[in-house]
Image (cartoon, rainbow, N blue to C red):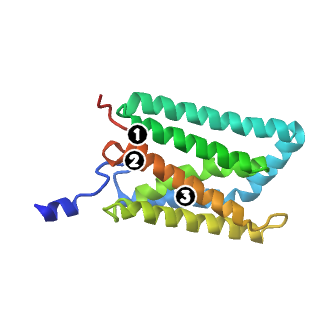
Amino acid sequence: METQLQDRPLFERGIFRREKTAWIILGVYTALLYATLTLTNDLYRATFDWLGKSTVSQGIYAIASLTALVLLVFAWLRLPRTPSAYATLGIIGLLTYYAMSLEYIPANRIHFFQYCPLTILGLEALRFRVRDRNVYLWTFLLVGLIGVGDELVQGMLPDRHFDTKDVVLNALAGLLALAFVGFAVREENYPWGKRGD
């Protein structure tokens, strides 16, 4: 009986049914993240020159607010209505807002929108192999490693540089995404939630 419980995965369901699919999607997402470094920088600069820093900054906050609203609707419709789930969402939201407000370059705030999905994809790939709570640690380390790689690639590009602060932002986005899964959604409700009043 105890052996059966140990063999049972922490996440019984997931977005992907096969491990190979999860790793391929993670690899493609990471490749796109790296491949579009110059494109996103050029797009940001063109938008910045056209609209100005204030408008771009407000636009990024608007996207963050819309994302927060979507997460609140998701929590309301799909997660059990528990104080801990809503408290976790509130704390994650405040930490995200605080971290974004510390970043004076609006383009760097986009890291949250890039690395949260990356974290979920990493968790999806690793959940097939790591069957206990160590999956959170391994996912965090994987996301951190991809974030360091992101900055190393930027350090090799003209007009770009390696920025330790961006590595921290990438890791923080990953940590907040894992906190959302672990404390708000929880393993038994992952990935889409299941209503249980």
Give the percent coordinates (x, y) of residue 14. 36, 49
Would you say residue 11 is visible in this rendering? Answer: yes
Residue designated by label 2: 15
Q: Residues within 10 Å of mark 3 (few under 14, many from 20)?
A: few
Residue depicted at x 46% and y 62%? 139
Q: Is residue 18 left or right of residue 121?
A: left
Quadrant assignment for the C terminus: top left
User: Of 141 and 32, which appears nearest the observer?
Assistant: 141
Which residue carries the number 1 mark?
84
Q: Nearer the viewer, mark 3 or mark 1?
A: 1
Q: Quadrant of residue 2?
A: bottom left
How would you rate the neighbour count of disc 1 (Cα within 10 Å): few for under 14, some for 14-19, many for 20 or more?
few
Residue type at the position of mark 1 = Ser
Name which residue type carries label 3: Val
Q: Residue furthest left?
A: 1
Gap in Å between the C-alphas at discs 1 and 2?
24 Å
Disc 3/disc 1 C-alpha distance (Å): 35 Å
Q: Nearer the viewer, residue 142 or 101?
A: 101
Residue 98 is situated, as x and y percent measured from the top left of the image, at 66, 45
Label 2 crowd (10 A; few <14 / some 14-19 / many >=20): few
Q: Answer with the quarter of the image where residue 93 lies.
A: top right
